[in-house]
Image (cartoon, helix red, strand yellow):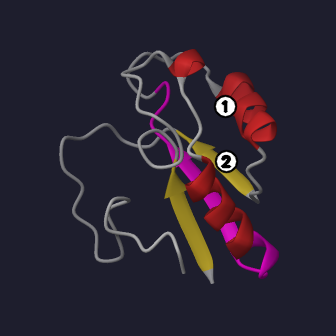
Amino acid sequence: MTYCFDIDGTLCSNTDGAYEDAEPWSDRIAHVNRLFDDGHRIKLFTARGSTTGIDWRPLTERQMAEWGVQYHELILGKPEADVFIDDKASHSDDWNWNR
């Protein structure tokens, strides 16, 4: 199974663009790592840089390494929107992080 996780506000604090100040949420990261260890494909998806054009990939990759996040693919360039409508989406606050 493939899981796609947003980063800011899902795996770490939402810093309104001050990504250097993001704090990891270790309980959620541990869950992602369990899925990875169980053989699932993990994609990380973020809007970092979508509106500014700044390349946040080096910082994001460094943070994921420092925080111990295991993943297969990092996708930057998530579209900016106030609301996402998707038939496969789950809100991070509603997700059962203790599965």
Mark 2 and mark 1: span between their CA atoms?
A: 9 Å
71 or 84: nearer the viewer: 71
Tally of numbered discs: 2
Segment colored magenta:
36-49
59 or 69: nearer the viewer: 69
Q: Percent x, y for residue 37?
A: 81, 74
Label number found at residue 74 = 2
**Mark 2 or mark 1: which is in front?**
1
96 vs 30: above or below: below
Q: Which amino acid does label 2 sit on?
A: Leu
Q: Percent x, y for residue 81?
A: 24, 41
The residue wearing badge 1 is 60
Mark 2 or mark 1: which comes first in sequence? 1
Residue at 36% of width from left, 42% of height from top? Answer: 79
Q: Which secondary structure lies at badge 1? A: helix
Q: Please check the rendered image and state whether residue 32 is part of the magenta-colored stretch, yes or no.
A: no
Badge 2, how many Cα within 10 Å: few under 14, some, many 20+? some
4 horizontally vs 30: left or right: left
60 or 10: nearer the viewer: 10
Q: Which secondary structure lies at badge 2? A: strand
Q: Quadrant of the C terminus?
A: bottom right
Q: Percent x, y for residue 58?
A: 74, 24
Q: Quadrant of the N terminus?
A: bottom right
Q: What residue type is labelled 1?
A: Thr
66 vs 37: above or below: above
Check contact, mark 2 vs mark 1: CB within 8 A. yes
Q: Please check the rendered image and state whether residue 43 is part of the magenta-colored stretch, yes or no.
A: yes
53 or 72: nearer the viewer: 72
Residue at 71% of width from left, 31% of height from top? Answer: 63
Quadrant of the image occupied by residue 51: top left
23 horizontally vs 68: left or right: left
69 horizontally vs 11: left or right: right
